[in-house]
Amino acid sequence: MLKRLLPLTMAISAALLATASVAAPASTIVTIDTGQLQGAAGDGVVAFKGIPFAEQPVGDLRWRPPQKAKAWTGVRPALKHGHDCLQAEVKGDPGMGTDLGEDCLYLNVWRPAETSVKKLPVMVWIYGGGLVNGGTQPAIYQGDAFAREGVVFVSLNYRLGRFGFFAHPALTAEHRAELKGNYAYMDQLAALQWVQRNIAAFGGDPKQVTLFGESAGGFSVHTLIASPMGKGLFQRAIVESGGGRSTEGPAPTVAAAEATGLAFAKANGVEGGDAAALAKLRALPAAAVTGNLSMFTAGANALTYPGPVTDGKLVVESPQAAYLGRRQAKVALMVGANGADLGFNTSKDMDALMAPFGADKAKAIAAYDPGGVGPFARVRSKVGMDQLMLEPARFDAATFAAQGLPAYEFRFDYVGDALKARSPNGAPHASEIPYVFDKYGAPYIAMVSPTHSGEASARDAAVAKTIHGYWLNFAKTGDPNGPGLPNWPRYAAAKDELMLFGGDGVAAATADPLKARMDLTASIQK
């Protein structure tokens, strides 16, 4: 009898052990290539915050590529965010950086508190802010909702403004073999390389990395897809309102940007292009480097701030050129923009606005102002956002699809019930973020519009669950579709279908309702 029971007992024990492993708790201590980290467990996740992924770019490391972080002894607490990168203040924006410092090259990791999966998909978030604002500390950028659903989530900081993009003859002469100019993009690459080396320690799979970002973060994703240096660091990409066209022409060369650096130096009392001048620039107070440069003053700072440059190694061409030439990383892509997105057209009147459409001017007027009632500012806004955001998203999806790559286009046009009066023309730029992160609620509503404060409605919550689910599925499989979600077809130019997150809260695949506008815009894009 005992002999007969023994195999059964062993089988039951094995089954119990297997069941226990399904919900194995994750340790709050991990070992990475620079030492041990102590995270914090709570609400179904373990969070590790303020992890240095490079040496801090201060002193002689100002305007140098990120250097590998030094190792430490003992267990380093990873319980709070490191500094967000220095920037001028922009009030009322829920994505702005806080607790600022020049020592800001930190990233954060969230993972499930309990899991039996040894190689979880990874999502890496790049924040927006015009490359001059933003950070990882804002509440809407916390990755716990993704981690609770089986993803290892990473958010990273990168240098902003003149700390992130700068050129000067003395910098060009110093360490000639090093990359120059695009320090922000170098930071993003360094963080992705850190992920490749270390994410397995958190249970993540370095071969299942989804890179995603919004606005300048989305543009950064495009840059890294197009860069020879980005290949192999991620397998999937999501771009939210990140453009993709060369609407302003190619970025200046490092040599051209040096003139901007000299102008900045002169404005701060530093003359010359030698090592002594560079030493003085590095000794400038950080506040002098930041100045008043923000998303709203970038134009006024154009003479002393170059923005991204064509450095010949990291940035060799525009994303548009890379996509058309099929030279980009061959990744799965999900891309889209919002119904009332950004646009910067500066035409003075309707004639000037419609003139670029040439022989199609009458068609353009019918498409953009069908009733002939304007107002002009609204018509101009639609033309501008189509050129900057909406049509480039279709272009991105189409060029990837033409290469046989999985591509999915979306348009987000839902406005939360408490904010509808504030946004009568549709979903503004960046308003999809709290839904993507499943963070839409009273704190966000109160921050963006104190006069329209309130709680999230049941419909708001349902939209968040839907869009969050699509993003999760894409990160896990390269396909946004999954149980309980409306089917989202791969983009095909012949059908020109996208997923519309409509103003009524319904997500549905549809032929692009703005096809006439998109076709007209495509005909005049550079």
Image: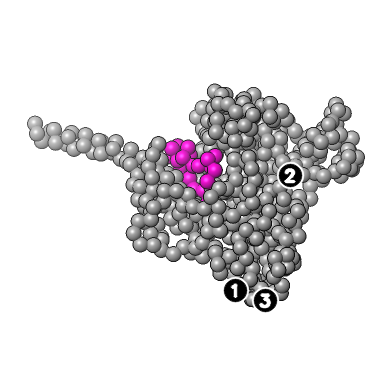
Mark earlier in primary sequence (3, 1): 1
Q: Residue 171's spot in the image, x, y percent?
A: 64, 71
Tell me how far mark 3 sits from mark 2, CA to CA.
39 Å
Instruction: Give the residue number, with chain letter if any, for mark 2.
Output: 388
Residue range corresponding to the magenta coloring: 137-156
* Kind of residue at disc 2: Leu
Q: Are marks 3 and 2 in contact (CB under 8 Å)?
A: no
Instruction: Give the residue number, with chain letter if any, for mark 3.
Output: 274
Q: Residue 108's spot in the image, x, y percent?
A: 47, 49
Taking the spot 62% from the left edge, 26% from the top edge, the residue there is 418
Left or right of 45? Residue 244 is: right
153 or 3: nearer the eye?
A: 153
Q: Element type at marker 1? A: loop
Mark earlier in primary sequence (2, 1): 1
Q: Residue 469's spot in the image, x, y percent?
A: 52, 34
Which of the image's four quarters has the N terminus?
top left
Q: Element type at marker 3? A: loop
